[in-house]
Amino acid sequence: MDEGWTVDTPRGILSNVTTTTTDHLFLRQYYLGCLSHASYLVADRSTGTAVVVDPQRDVAEYLADAAANGFTITHVLETHFHADFLSGHLELQEATGAVIGYGRAAEGRAEFPITTFGDGDLIELGRVVLEIRETPGHTPESISIVVWPDGLDGQPHGVLTGDTLFIGDVGRPDLLASVGVTADELARSLYHSLHRKLLTLPDETQVYPAHGAGSACGKHLSTETVSTIGEQVRTNYALAPMTVDQFVEVVTQGQTAAPLYFPFAATLNRQSRELLHEDDIVPSLSLDEVLAHQRSGAVVIDARDDREFAQGHLRGSVNVGLGGRFAEYVGEVMEPGTPIVLVAPDGREAEAKIRLARIGFDRVLGALADPVQVFFRNPEHVTSLSRLSAADVTQRQRDVAGLVLIDVRNAGEVELGSIPGARHIALPELLRRRNELDPTAPTLVFCAGGYRSAIASSLLWSLGFTDVSDIIGGYTAWAARPQDVPSVTAGEGMAETSRSDDPAVLLDVREADEWAAGHAPHAVLVPMSEIPQRIAELPAGRRIVCICRSGNRSGQVTAFLRHHGFDVVNLIGGSKAWVELGLPFVDSAGNPGIVA
């Protein structure tokens, strides 16, 4: 397996690329971090026959890699009708003439010609054979694709699981409630798909999912993008021994609000639509043209850093920085189909356009030319963003009558604590719930670190709210005030948790992948997101020393548990301080570990 590498081009193709080769097999994973999306090029090296699985909409990478290796792409296989991105199946078909394939349950649901595959159907690339397994649960038509490098007489190398099985999680079953398929029905199908179709594969079979950490298609996805069946059986909470009813309960609880654009993208993925032409130029617009578009209903998306936006921006624009999950957050704060005008960092207009096209937001009218100079010369059209430090929040609550606090984080984050008096409206729900708020009331919004709150604050201003601020550093900064929680050093934590008489519990609240890379041998793992649901497992009568990577997450958990009556202290500096002091730290195999 080759090492992963990163590509950064003017089109904004930001991918980690990992390649596996054997005598016959070529398998390349493309990982698009800004959408947490994994796609695949699978080929037989001896025949040159190849397929692409779950492609992103801008398909130049697949075509270039196929050409470089002498491959002919004969099929584009979709593991299901995706909701979180617009797939490139039509673009690839136009470029290659490839057959578009789906699971059998997709029959009659696409507006374009497709070939459907059912359980046991084979696609023979040469010695390399792809076996289709129907794995409904995330959606009714979901399939997984088993890769046999030396035919069915050999051993499977891996399985492309789509949104059925992730690393550390499984696909959420609740996204189709609006079209008449219940979460309960799909969750029961998902249980059987996992146990009858995927877990029957050998433990060493590689697992290649369609998404990783950050995707809204699950709730506990790992930052790892490849695993094995055996590793997932050992570590994935959803694969632990349980009944079907228990499985349904555990996978349907705690899901985040789906972004506003999901139904739009899911519908568009079934339609014959306009094709993306990646090299189209983004028109440059004058200020007068931008203002005219704005008056006609266009939304101005300012893709600069939130700090630059705060200093000065076009009145009525919405800030969604290119440095984050740009397309996804744009899709959370505006209605699909709305015309868009861009204000982009210098030279990155084309990247912004491509990234929006990946979720089907194609109505980009153009980009404001030379925005900094335009703002300098036209101050009457420019305003700044009101931002408060964490230290100012308490005074603001005391001094401003009727102050409304809005927490725009996800539900799982809020369960661990929020600013007293705050109202929870997750960012994906803010646009559709705006009528619940008084636009004339003084309003303060916050998220975890400031990125999402800048989006939320600018959105409310654009909707006519008259007094909106956000918190610099978000809830993390507010919760990290010195007086919040008692703490210990790494040395003190080691002493407390290692004494022979009534030792304290060392509670590690990082994610499972971080734990696997390295942890204190005597620590107990309960990830931060699972603390509220698993609080009954914690020892109420013993002292707890809480540790994470740097002391931030563990500080939040410490405050939460102390509020619920536990004797808890936070370990300053987290695992990094632990390792720096030379204290024992091992990986999941018992070898020397690292801080991931």
Image (spheres, rainbow, N blue to C red):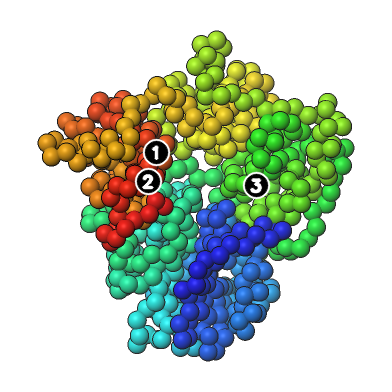
Task: Estimate how packed mark 3 is, as few (under 14), some (14 to 19) or many (20 or more) residues with alpha carbons within 10 Å.
Answer: many
Q: Nearer the viewer, residue 592 or 423?
A: 592
Distance Cα–Cα, label 3 vs label 2: 35 Å
Specify whether residue 559 is in view.
yes
The mark nearer the N terminus, 3 or 2, is: 3
Give me the residue at 62% from left, 49% from top.
327
Judge depth for marks 1 and 3 and give the one in front.
1
Q: Is residue 299 left or right of residue 174?
A: right
Marks 3 & 2, CB-CB < 8 Å contact: no
Give me the residue at 45% from left, 61% from top. Answer: 225
Q: Tell me the CA gap for discs 2 and 1.
A: 10 Å
**In the displayed structure, would residue 283 be above or below residue 552?**
below
Residue occupied by mark 3? 322
Question: Which element is circle 1 on?
Answer: loop
Q: Does any portion of residue 183 appear in the rendered image? A: no
What whole-number distance in Å separates the C-alpha atoms at marks 1 and 3?
Answer: 30 Å
State the image coordinates of residue 181 (x, y, percent, origin top left): 43, 53
Of label 1 and label 3, which has the lower sequence position?
A: 3
Q: Alpha-carbon neighbours of circle 2 within 10 Å: few (<14), some, or many (≥20)?
A: few
Residue bearing mark 1: 573
* Contact check, label 1 and label 3, Cβ < 8 Å: no
| Vertical order, 231 against 487 (above or below) | below
The answer to whether 303 appears left or right of 25 in the picture is: right
For the residues bearing labels 2 and 1, Cβ distance under 8 angstroms: yes
Percent x, y for residue 285? 85, 45
Neighbours of disc 1 within 10 Å: few (<14), some (14-19), many (20+): some
Q: Which residue is mark 2?
A: 580
Closer-to-camera residue (14/568) = 568
